[in-house]
Image (tube, helix red, strand yellow):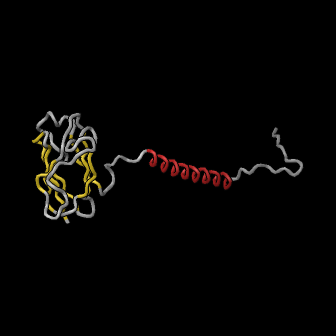
Amino acid sequence: MIIRSTPTNGETKPSTSPRAVGRWKIAVVIIAIVVIAVFSEVLSYYFPSESPGAPYLVTIKMPNGSAANQSLTFSPATVTVVLGVNNTVQWFNLDHAAHSVVFTQVPAGSNITTASLSSQTSPGIIYDNYYGPILLPAPGTYKYYDALHQWMTATIIVES
């Protein structure tokens, strides 16, 4: 025996056609995409990428343990950048010891002197943080070393 209910007083039976179900699924997918897009924008605002990530910024690291290990130096030890594209450099000290960056060679026309970079707390010394960014304004070879750990040497080549 089959019992069927019939609408009364002008009521309509809910639609269960395949088209209505398909439209419902499409609406849910669109809402999910919008929610994900908004959520990712909020996350990127509160948690920006560490980037050393912008394409125009080059990061050079002082590895952990480099103050005690003479086989460790700036990483990378040689960097080639392009003038006007990625010739802005910053240094990150990942070691627990202080380091420094002293230029020994800079190209003619550069406003960088053969002198120490410094943090705001102590001239010439970079503690457990970073220094920079600085713009290397002229093409040529920039050589530098760590005055506190003189085996740490590196080169930056700026091409035009």
Q: How many marks?
A: 0
Residue that protrudes farthest toward the right in the picture: 9
**Viewer-proximal residue, 155 or 7?**
155
Say left or right for 25 vs 40.
right
Residue at left offset 26%, top offset 64%: 84
Say left or right for 142 vs 94.
left
**Viewer-proximal residue, 97 or 49?**
97
Vertical arrangement, residue 60 with respect to residue 83, above or below? above
Q: Quadrant where the C terminus lies? A: bottom left
Q: Quadrant of residue 120?
A: top left
Q: Position of residue 41 (x, y in %)?
A: 48, 51
Q: Position of residue 49 (x, y in %)?
A: 38, 47
Q: Position of residue 33 (x, y in %)?
A: 54, 52
Residue at left offset 79%, top offset 49%: 13
Q: Quadrant of residue 47?
A: top left
Q: Quadrant where the N terminus lies? A: top right
Q: Position of residue 5 (x, y in %)?
A: 83, 43
Residue at left offset 82%, top offset 43%: 4
